[in-house]
Amino acid sequence: MKIAIVEDEHLASSYLKSILEQQDVLSIDTISVLKSVKEAVAFFSENKVDLAFMDIHLGDGKSLEIFEKADISCPVIFVTAYDSYAISVFKHFTIDYLLKPFEEEELLEALQKFKKIKDSFNSNSTLQSLVAIENPESSKIQRHFLVNHGYKMISINENEITYFAATGKHLFIHIKSTNSYLYNSTLTEIINSLDPFHFFKINRKYIVSRDSIKEVIKHSNQKVELILTVPAAESDAIFISKKEINNFKNWLDQ
């Protein structure tokens, strides 16, 4: 297994490399240490690795620039000193993060998580997390949703929402009272404005809230059913998309 560390602080990269060399969770062949955006872009343009550790801010720029200039398809574990909002984004979109200063046990736990979900990793999620961090205004969380109800307009608080459901070309907001309202958006658009701790897009038809989940039924490793606390928009059973099963488990484990 090949690993890359993108870190401009010598002590931080040496500490991380030392633990990786001594651990027995993964069998590692090579560890490449890259100290700048320039080095990382040149490296990833010519090399592929199985896992990368990456700080957000480097001496000559930000990690987002590396993804914009080189094709990085491997999972990334972020090593960061960022605030709670950034951490919530990392939890939702990436395999894991390490908050500086971290202990050896935390790193080993991250490696264990990597082993479990590396085969179903979606590389687009890493870039999505970085865009959310670097552009906080465009990623501002929406707390209220204005809908039409007859001659009235109603502002629905996020805490009242059980799930969003796509029916044909329309999007409906379903709330705890079991009422539903047409909303002018799409699942793809709205997921980027929702609180990633409270909401999760389980498939192409549903975004569910954490509080609306009653049961999770595992029929097999690739077939997981969701039972909600309120009636579903359709009579058919709700299944989590195969590619989202591991991400969903990590989301529930927060």
Image: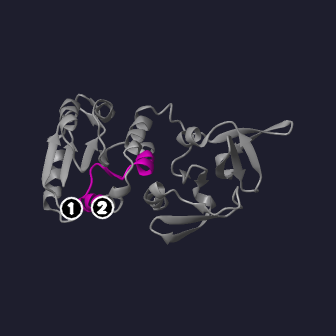
**Label 2 crowd bin: few (<14), some (14–19), many (20+), radius 10 Å:** few
Q: Is residue 58 left or right of residue 120?
A: left
Question: What amino acid is found at the position of numbered circle 1 in the picture?
Answer: Leu
- What is the quadrant of residue 119 in the picture? bottom left
Q: Is residue 252 left or right of residue 21?
A: right
Between residues 194 and 75, which one lies in front from this camera angle?
A: 75
Q: Position of residue 33 (x, y in %)?
A: 15, 43
Q: Which mark is residue 115?
A: 2
SS type, badge 2? helix
Q: Is residue 220 above or below residue 133?
A: below
- Assess whether residue 79 is covered by the magenta stretch: no
Tell me what residue is drawn at x 77 percent, y 52 percent.
179
Q: Is residue 45 above or below residue 206?
A: above
Tell me what residue is drawn at x 46 percent, y 64 percent.
222
Between residues 152 and 222, which one lies in front from this camera angle?
A: 222
Q: Do callouts 1 and 2 mark residues in contact (Cβ within 8 Å)? A: yes
Colour scheme in use: one colour
Badge 1 is on which residue?
A: 26
- Assess whether residue 102 is covered by the magenta stretch: yes
Q: Quadrant of the N terminus?
A: bottom left
Q: Which mark is residue 212?
A: none
Between residues 12 and 221, which one lies in front from this camera angle?
A: 221
Question: Which region is colored magenta?
Answer: 87-112
Tell me what residue is drawn at x 67 percent, y 62 percent.
236
How would you classify the magenta stretch by its main secondary structure?
Answer: helix
Question: What amino acid is found at the position of numbered circle 2 in the picture?
Answer: Lys
The residues tagged by marks 1 and 2 sit, at their Cα atoms, a distance apart of: 8 Å
- What is the quadrant of residue 32 in the picture? top left
Q: Position of residue 64 (x, y in %)?
A: 33, 34
